[in-house]
Image (tube, helix red, strand yellow):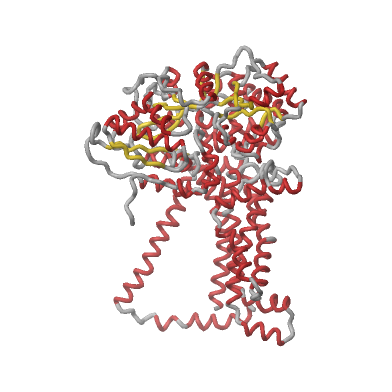
Amino acid sequence: MSRPRSTGALGGTSVPRSALVTMAATRRTVLRGAALSSLAVGGASLLAACGGDSGGPASGSGATVKFGINEAEGVGAAHDRLAAIAQAYEKESGTKVALNAVDHNTFQESINTYLQGTPDDVFTWFAGFRMAQFAENGLITDLSDQWPIDGLNDSFKQASTAADGKQYFVPISYYPWAVFYRKSVFEKNGWEAPSTNDDFMALMDDMKGKGITPFAFGDKDGWPAMGTFDILNMRLNGFDFHMSLMAGDEAWDGDEVKLVFDTWRKLLPYHQEDPLGRTWQEAATSMGKGDCGMYLLGTFVVDALGENGEDLDFFTFPELDSSIGSDALDAPIDGFCVAAAGKNQDAGKAMAKWLGSAAAADAGNNAADAPFIAANSGASTSTYSDLQKKSAEVVGAAANIAQFMDRDTNADFASTVMIPSIQEFLKNPDDIDGVTASIQEQAASIFG
Amino acid sequence: MAHIDEAPQQERAAAPTPGKEKRLPARDRLTVIVMVTVPLLLVLFLVWLPALGSVALSFGKWNGFGDIDTIEWVGFQNYQDIATIYPPFWPAIQHNLIWLGFLFLIPTPLGILLAVVLDREMKGSRFYQTAFYMPVVLSLALIGFIWQLFYSRDQGLINDVFGTQVDWYGDPDVNLWAVLAATSWRHTGYIMLIYLAGLKGVDASLREAAAVDGANEVKTFFHVILPVMRPINLIVIVIVVIESLRAFDLVWIVNKGRNGLEVIGALVAQNVIGEATRYGFGSALAVIMMLISSVFITIYLRTVFREERRG
């Protein structure tokens, strides 16, 4: 038997090129691409095999900190950025960083086994419910002594905080969900980004009149339509209700949720038909070709278009209820946690703090051809595209930021109940009572 | 057939008794003990322990955090939930049965037919063998990609060529059949190869004798070859049953077993190996799958043992 490798070039290169094309930068679920699922089964043991014993001093010069990242070598910018950040930290602190690069999907699906086995000291993760769940179960280390971190504002601190009021997470980047459109298509038709609900409806009717489907829509993978649910719920019932619903504290068969589905039902005629057979990449392509006018998605929409996004612009989903406003949106935050079972806690914490700095973000962005939008306000924006500059502005102006349904709620609930239920609704939009009742029954069983 | 088999059985039953007093030398006994216990332990630890573990877990609720003592025991709640409030379950059972019926009716006979045709050593038969077997060898990721190219609603080959707008993967009334077509593509080659291997082993003199007796090809196959191939036929049947019960891979690649493509295997995976960690619930599904499989396994084993007793 060969010795376990301490840095795994797991999977990355063996994945077919075809599957990698769409995998570029940010969105983790991109990697859920069916092609990779076969890796998942073997993943847990491989991840565990990446551990080992550590020696040497605990921190500072000569110490080693293990850094688990959820991007395999060869996937492009996403991996290059993290690798560059690790190198920059080595140079800066003299601490040796042992990189453990694991395929994105595998990393995600094995996270439980990973954290309870022999995890790396610092690892990539997301803000939101699951981070808080790890905190609650004592799987990640309290980082409140490392906060505040220069350049990370209160909303990021809030997003890094678990139920006990302590911080367990250090953010590095984020991306917003918004309504994307082709500038050229809007210009040609004399359309403008709508600011009120009336403008919005008028715009969609005009598009339909001109034979263009207003919204591109694809939900074959199950998660993209969650974005639509999220934004409608935040616009109709407000951010606080949305978060409390996600936490399992509100009824899914109440009037609020029914209102969301009912509004969605009325908007469905403005969406592309047959969404359940279409991937988000295909939907993005129809928007790119001008068959559809708009597409509600994360900024990773540019990845599917194979261009740098110069002809793309976006607006946040308009207000639906004037008493609620339109100042909340989904903007998932990526960042780092320190594993409680990691061998080198001090070095891990020190590194986590540094990872939140502007220097870390700059190191990553300068090394890759596609930058991320840094969470740190001191980070340089010189490498940003126009789209990213605007994203930073919009998210900065938002009063409330949600993390997307599958990060804001129990993963069991999101993937085994909400995905099939939303798909059921899309198949049969008139049976709202049936769908909401079924969700509620299953929610009661899961949230107990 | 059965009536002539009774006699030898009696003889054999009488045979072992005299050997009983004969003791094996110590070394041989040790060998026997090792040869029995090692596989036995392997089976216990690798098959029975995990299987019983699943059964135990299926009575609990556990998200995988913390030790075993954090499992909350809920009795039959998981099973009750599966049968009552878990919408994908009954469609999944139905789809597995459709899968079984379909494999038996279309790709299996087709694979056998191809094997018989290719067995005739026609020109280029090697090439055809490879071509038909190719789908079995291809990696799953590639297969998913190939069929996506055919079936994509907006950009797929089928809709492009025929000018149709069928939502092959998204329409729950259509997608099961689309996936079954893709499965057949693979299954046919598999069955073909197994059958071909069997046919190569058939004594050529049987065929010659049949030809001398004036039987035509079809008659020869059904009255001579097929009965001789009995062990292979049994293997084929078992393979078809197992393949359809554990139907999983293509479905998982298409849409993770949702929206019209629910099958039990995919439901287990959704609940356990994905991001979701409903270990109790997933185990309950797995136990149900195990129970259904064991019905078929029992039937198979009974047939095999009966066969051996006859032999």
Q: Residue at x 51, y 83 (%)?
A: B11
Instruction: Look at the picture and state if A427 lies above or below B174.
Output: above
Q: Residue at x 33, y 76 (%)?
A: B28
Residue B57 appears left or right of B186: left
Q: Based on the displayed image, in which of its 4 quarters is residue A133 positioned?
A: top left
How far across and down, in percent of the image, does residue A291 sit?
70, 32
Q: Based on the displayed image, in which of its 4 quarters is residue B188 positioned?
A: bottom right
How far across and down, in percent of the image, does residue A59 sit?
25, 32
Farthest-out residue, top: A323
Q: Residue at x 37, y 65 (%)?
A: B37
How far across and down, in percent of the image, does residue B211 sit?
71, 84
How far across and down, in percent of the image, does residue B221 sit?
69, 76
Instruction: Look at the picture and state if A128 lies above or below B134.
Output: above
Residue closest to the eye, A71 or B3 = A71
Residue A266 appears left or right of A34: right
Residue B303 appears left or right of A123: right
Q: Is residue A299 visible?
A: yes
Residue A237 appears left or right of A107: right
Q: Is residue A247 visible?
A: no
Report the label total: 0
